[in-house]
Image (tube, rainbow, N blue to C red):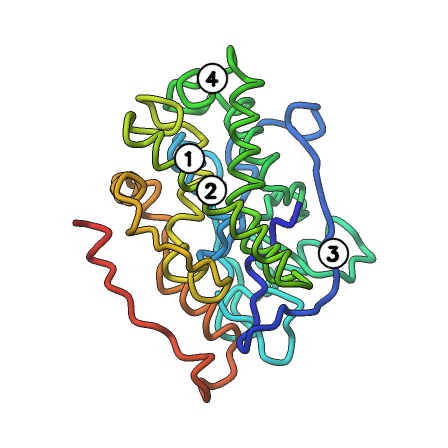
Amino acid sequence: MTQNNACDFRSGGNTVITKQTVTIDKRFSTQELPIEANRYRLILGGFCPWATQVAIEIDYLGLDQVISKGVIWPLRRANNHADWMFGAKDTDQDPVLKTTKLSQNYQKAIPDFAGRPSVPALIDIKTGQVVNNVTDVLLDELALVWDKFSNQNQELFYPQEQQKKFKTAANEILHKINEIPGKILNIGSQNEYEKLATTFFNQLDKFEIILQHQSYLWGDNLTQLDIRLFASLVRFDLVYYYQNKLNYRCLTDYPALWAYAKRLYQVPAFKNNTDFYDIKQHFYRVDDHIIDSIERVIPLLDENKWND
């Protein structure tokens, strides 16, 4: 999965070449991890389309009462693009984990860790170790295994009687929407770009037709599918249209999709985990170097249109 590529855009149009990420995939469903209230903390970036999916789901299911959340600083350090810090100053700490940079929590899990820490990162507060950093896994684990703490109807949010079909729909969003911006940053030819962009817009066309006839992707009820799609839609016009050259159409050119995205934005779990400031800072300014060129300028955004 190329789940973190979309968060690695470098001003000037080049991808950031850094150390490799690692996959940490301990699960609750396999009893590797105990299901225990107030034991885990999700570290996310308000800019990241992968981490915010997990944050939205936690809040929507009411799991924010038993799983806390912490946020990394949206800008890389100009002299260290390979780590995430917890604040503007090097001494700033996460108030719960008491670490200053995310790599420290990866090192607690992997003592010889020398890679690039990524978000989302679910951390065991007792040990300080990252226990899972895979978006797709976290989304399903939280929806299916933490149901005793949820305040939503699990069957409506993640219909297990149709689980195979539902997972196929989730994978369609993952591969044809979520992953496309990151893949485009690593293309090596015009043909590769056009193939990826065509896949992206063909899928949006399909969703536009679906949403002309129903309120949500799975019918009349909000499901995990809507969280997966929203994270990309809310970054489409602001980031992907320009930086990833997904500019065949805007989100606002799709009446049903645009109305759907705005409707989701009014749900507190979605709005509270949509940080336009962090999105702009990360994708345009990139790091804490001074803004000295057009590539680093932070664009204006009429956020009020999301409330119309």
Residue 28 sits in which quadrant?
A: top right
- What label sits on residue 206 in the rendered view? 1
Name which of mark 2 and mark 3 comes first in the sequence. 3
Residue 107 image label: 3
Q: Mark 2 points at which residue?
A: 202
Task: Name the N-terminal-most of marks 1 and 3.
Answer: 3
- Of all residues, the one furthest to the right in this rendering is 112
Q: Where is residue 103 in the image (x, y as percent from the top left)?
A: 67, 60
User: Badges 1 and 2: C-beta atoms under 8 Å apart?
Assistant: yes
Q: Distance between the residues labelled 2 and 3?
A: 42 Å
Q: Find the distance from the CA under tag 1 to the CA under tag 3.
A: 43 Å
Question: Looking at the image, is mark 4 or mark 3 earlier in the sequence?
Answer: 3
Crowding near the residue tagged with mark 4, few <14, some 14–19, many ≥20 C-alpha atoms within 10 Å: some
Answer with mark 4 or mark 2, whichever residue precedes in sequence. 4
What type is the residue that disc 2 sits on? Asn
Give the tally of numbered discs.
Answer: 4
Residue 283: x percent and y percent? 48, 67
Query: Residue at horizontal 60%, vertical 48%?
Result: 121
Give the image location of residue 92, x and y in percent: 52, 69
The amino acid beneath tag 1 is Lys
